[in-house]
Image (tube, rainbow, N blue to C red):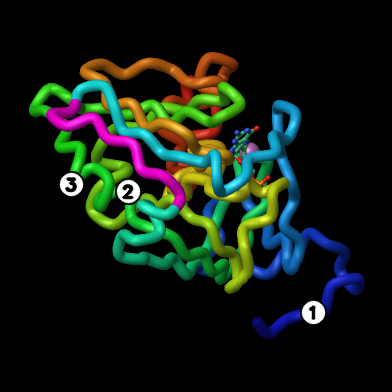
């Protein structure tokens, strides 16, 4: 990206970049860690992902079973509500669509709760995790996802603020009705669209 180097203007670049949602700045090469709970140690041997709730076929995949599914990658930007954005990230894993195709949400299943192994939760309308918009990822820039960033596997919903991307994802529960997750109970917006600046309740 053209423009002044870091250190000259400080870390908050003021250049306007069409990739930058309103109120955000380019964090550059950094990838801040934001975690509300103690970082869990999860080994691939014990990791699993379950899709349950309002589905016809509740299913659990082990590490090997998940890795046997068709891989899917994301290259693009991520945006945290604390105002940093990171451009051109590269994640790889599987599409949430692949899991939901097997679990088959019922017609009444209209929301999901993403649940971390730690108990962290975040809620999403099912449309925000289908149609190629959400992933379970285990690679960042071609390397295993670092544990502090949610490794071995996190959710990735890059078109929404990053609190919707649950680290250490363990269960996706399909629900009939919307229910607030951890940050949503604590004042954050229910949906979190960075282009609409949906940061806090009432935005
Ligand atoms: N389990 C868990 N997932 C989480 C969080 C958390 O505290 N716990 N924080 C969320 C928030 S607020 C952000 S901005 C991103 C931070 O991800 P990072 O630490 O990889 O940058 O993770 C999201 N997912
Ligand atoms: Mo965040």
- Magenta span: 55-63
Judge left or right: residue 202 versus residue 89. Answer: left
Residue sitting at x 46%, y 50%: 63
Disc 3 target residue: 101
Q: CA distance from mark 1 to mark 2?
A: 38 Å
Which is nearer the N-term, disc 1 or disc 2? 1
Residue 112, above or below 99: above
Q: CA distance from mark 1 to mark 3?
A: 46 Å
Q: Where's residue 14, x and y in %? A: 72, 64
Q: Which mark is residue 194?
A: none
| Quarter containing the N terminus | bottom right
Please rate how many residues cluster around mark 3, counting C-alpha atoms within 10 Å: few if below 14, some from 14 to 19, many from 20.
few
Please rate how many residues cluster around mark 2, counting C-alpha atoms within 10 Å: few if below 14, some from 14 to 19, many from 20.
many
Helix, strand or loop status at disc 2: helix
Judge left or right: residue 37 versus residue 106. Answer: right
Residue sitting at x 55%, y 63%: 139
Residue 131, above or below 112: below
**Count of numbered circles on the image:** 3
Do labels 1 and 3 touch, CB within 8 Å?
no
Disc 1 target residue: 4
Nearest the eye: 134 or 147 = 147
Residue 83, above or below 4: above
Judge left or right: residue 25 versus residue 142. Answer: right
Do labels 1 and 2 touch, CB within 8 Å?
no
**Can residue 195 be spotted in the picture?**
no
Q: Where's residue 8, x and y in %? A: 90, 73
Magenta stretch: includes residue 46: no
Where on the picture, by quarter, is residue 117?
Answer: top right
Please rate how many residues cluster around mark 1, counting C-alpha atoms within 10 Å: few if below 14, some from 14 to 19, many from 20.
few
Q: Where's residue 13, x and y in %? A: 75, 65
Residue sitting at x 36%, y 43%: 61
């Amino acid at each position: 990206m053209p423009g002044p180097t870091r250190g000259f203007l400080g870390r908050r670049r003021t250049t306007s970049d069409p990739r930058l949602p309103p109120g955000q700045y380019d964090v550059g090469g950094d990838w801040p860690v934001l975690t509300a709970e103690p970082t869990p140690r999860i080994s691939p041997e014990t990791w699993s992902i379950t899709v349950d709730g309002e589905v016809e076929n509740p299913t659990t995949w082990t590490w090997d079973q998940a890795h046997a599914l068709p891989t899917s990658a994301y290259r693009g930007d991520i945006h945290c509500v604390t105002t940093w954005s990171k451009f051109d990230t590269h994640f790889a894993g599987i599409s949430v669509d692949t899991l939901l195709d097997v679990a088959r949400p019922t017609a009444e299943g209209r929301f999901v709760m993403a649940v971390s192994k730690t108990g962290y939760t975040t809620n999403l309308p099912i449309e925000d995790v289908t149609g190629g918009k959400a992933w379970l990822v285990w690679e960042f820039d071609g390397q295993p996802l670092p544990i502090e960033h949610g490794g071995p596997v996190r959710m990735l919903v890059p078109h929404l603020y990053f609190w919707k991307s649950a680290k250490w994802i363990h269960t996706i529960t399909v629900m009939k009705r919307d229910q607030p997750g951890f940050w949503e109970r604590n004042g954050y917006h229910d949906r979190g669209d960075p282009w609409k600046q949906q940061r806090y309740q009432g935005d």
